[in-house]
Amino acid sequence: MLPRLLSLLPVLILILVLVGLILVGYVKAPPDQAYIISGLKKEGRILIGRAGVKIPFFERLDKLYLGQMTVDIKTEQSVPTNDFINVNVDAVAKVRISPTTEGIKLAAKNFLNKRAADITMDLQDSLQGNMREIIGTLSLKEINTDRDSFSDQVMQKASKDMDKLGIEILSCNIQNVTDENGLIRDLGADNTSLIKKNAAIAKAQADRDVAIAQAEADKAANEARVLSDTQIAQRNNELEIKRAELKIISDTKKAEADAAYTIQQQEQQKSIETATVNAQIAKAEREADLKKQEVEIAKQTLDADIRAQADAARYRQEQEAQADLFKRQKEAEAKRYEQEQEAEAMKKAAEAAKYAKEQEAAGIAAVGKAEAAAIQAKALAEAEGIDKKAEAMKKYGQAAMVEMVMQALPDIARNVAEPLSKVDKITMYGEGNSAKLLQDIINGTTQITEGFTEGMGIDVKALLSGLLGGKIAASSEESAAPVINIHTGESGAAP
């Protein structure tokens, strides 16, 4: 048993030695580092995040940091831009060693077993030089307004040099840009003015929109009020018309007088309101012209910011003036519409009065027709009475006619001789003048009797002759003739 153990001792020792060597040479690389084992082979082994064995005394282990590193890039001195403005730029770059085999090999030649801070110090000078070269190709405005493009150009320029060192640039950010003469601050002030100007314009536009919306709301409210007032006026007009119809007899004259007065008053009020509106429009136009002149003067003396504010103020005032003018016009239109409605009401009242007059005239016409009918009826009755009287006379015969003629003859003779009673003095010349005068009187009476004969068909002489005889007829004619004492001579007077 012992000899066998002694024979196996060398093997055990060899195994123990191999195990010891393995334990001593065992290494395990973390993910952010590369372990490079070199010595036996021409090309070393690279371990990243895995384990391996290093043969003691024959191989060596070197470490290379693969994590992300931050490089602070600053221009220690001012660098002139493309437009010859000296600027200072502060930037930060994120870099790491390229995780490829070729990159690790290149980086191992320069940064093997170095700390991250030492690697960033070695890269800082190279990156600063690349950034200075890019600054010289750009203008100040491009550096400030397009920093992404600036950083991309720095990365593109520096990548060529970094690839030779096995370094990969992850990002490059521009932190700060300053200049010696404060031009960037002036550009900022210009931008600030522009922003304020745009803000003022936006506020003015918002105020304008609010004013327009308010004007629209006022317009809608005014239209609703006008519609309501119109309906109320229509209802009132209908009520007034009904009242006027009920009281048309007693209120006709009063309505006419009130209508004339109201129309005249409305015409005067309309003229006053028209003149007032024209005056207000002229005043608004003069104020607008004055504001325009003030704005023009302000434009010549103020800078861009104040001009913008003046423009906004002028625009707002114009909008307010237009809104106010629009409101006044709508109020004037509403008032004119109300007046027209009132005039229409008065017109209807006048028409009602006219209708009453027409009814009154119709009544008068009816009364006239009735009176005419009554007169016509009276005339017809009188004519009928005359006809009846004539028929009665026909019944009486010639005796009645003779009686009537005899009763009328004295009156006829009296009427024939009546003009002579009014004569103060009659002068007659020649012979037989008294006889001639008497003959004229008798002839006048005879003509009347002959008129009876021709008009009525009654022969008065025949009737008298037939009833009384010629002597009675002659004596009747002599007794019917008036007795006149006439003094003949050169002059005489009839009593």
Image: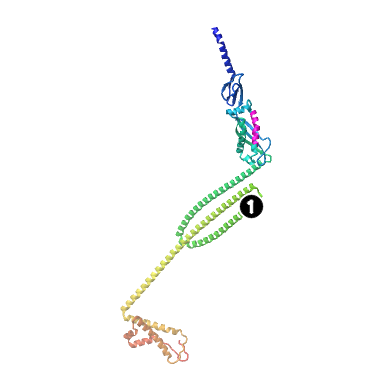
Task: State the residue at coordinates (38%, 84%).
Answer: 447
Query: In the depicted view, which residue is nearer to us: 168 or 305?
Result: 168
Judge from the rendering whether residue 80 lies leftward or rightward of residue 394; answer left or right.
Answer: right
Asked which quadrant contains residue 483, the reply is bottom left
Query: In the depicted view, which residue is nearer to us: 423 or 42?
Result: 42
From what the image shows, is residue 399 above or below residue 36?
A: below
User: Under tag 1, what secondary structure?
Assistant: helix
Number of numbered discs visible in the structure rendering:
1
Judge from the rendering whether residue 379 lies leftward or rightward of residue 318; answer left or right.
Answer: left
Q: Is residue 174 visible?
A: yes
Mark 1, residue position: 296
Task: State the residue at coordinates (65%, 48%).
Answer: 303
Q: Quadrant of the C terminus?
A: bottom left
Which region is colored magenta?
117-132
Query: In the depicted view, which residue is nearer to us: 328 or 286?
Result: 286
Query: In the depicted view, which residue is nearer to us: 27 or 323?
Result: 27
Q: Is residue 66 visible?
A: no
From what the image shows, is residue 9 above or below residue 228?
A: above
Asked which quadrant contains residue 428, the reply is bottom left
Q: Where in the figure is residue 125, as x and y percent of width and height?
A: 66, 32
Q: Where in the figure is residue 207, as x and y percent of width and height?
A: 58, 47
Judge from the rendering whether residue 5 lies leftward or rightward of residue 375; answer left or right.
Answer: right
Amino acid on which the number 1 mark rests in the picture: Glu
Task: State the residue at coordinates (40%, 68%).
Answer: 369
> Is residue 221 found inside the magenta-colored segment of the image?
no
Q: Where in the figure is residue 95, as x and y percent of width and height?
A: 61, 31
Q: Residue at the front extreme?
A: 42
Task: State the residue at coordinates (64%, 38%).
Answer: 135
Asked which quadrant contains residue 395, the reply is bottom left
